[in-house]
Image (cartoon, rainbow, N blue to C red):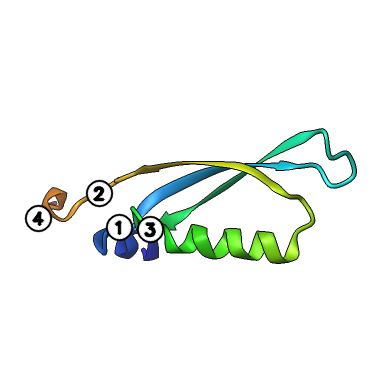
Amino acid sequence: MANLDLQLQGFRLTTAQIYYYFPDYPRLIQEFLWQDYDLAPRFPKLQEFLTFWKKDIEGTLHSVYISHQKLIGLGEITHSTFEEHL
């Protein structure tokens, strides 16, 4: 239910492809996928994660690609009633 609440507040499912240099072999590039609900266009949760990465993780960032998808909007919810008579 928490995900629905976030979507109703305007959060979108965000995926970031994070490419970074492998710490032990700096010529190799690894990929890390990050996914969470975040607010476009500033992406505060992703920014917080990337700040953590730069501070606490050894792999130097190469590039980050972001995609996001609005899954549900305020106008897309309708109320329906169901009755069953036996």
- Nearest to N terminus: mark 2 or mark 4: 2
- Nearest to N terminus: mark 4 or mark 1: 1
Task: Kindly identify the residue that appears in the image at 38 percent across and 44 percent down.
Answer: 68
Q: Which residue is mark 3?
A: 42
Task: Kindly identify the residue that appears in the image at 68 percent across and 60 percent down.
Answer: 54
Looking at the image, residue 49 sits to the left or right of residue 15; the answer is: right
Give the SS element for disc 1: helix
Q: CA distance from mark 2 to mark 1?
A: 6 Å
**Would you say the residues marked 2 and 1 are in contact, meaning their CB atoms lie under 8 Å apart?**
yes
What crowding class fits label 3: few (fewer than 14 Cα within 10 Å), some (14-19), or many (20 or more)? few
Q: Which residue is mark 1?
A: 7
- Nearest to N terminus: mark 3 or mark 1: 1
Task: Kindly identify the residue that appears in the image at 79 percent across and 56 percent down.
Answer: 58
Looking at the image, residue 55 sits to the left or right of residue 69; the answer is: right
The percent position of residue 5, horizontal first and vertical second, equals 31, 65
The percent position of residue 11, horizontal first and vertical second, equals 33, 58
Q: Which residue is mark 4?
A: 81
Task: Kindly identify the residue that appears in the image at 76 percent across and 42 percent down.
Answer: 21
Identify the mark at residue 72; answer none if there is no mark: 2
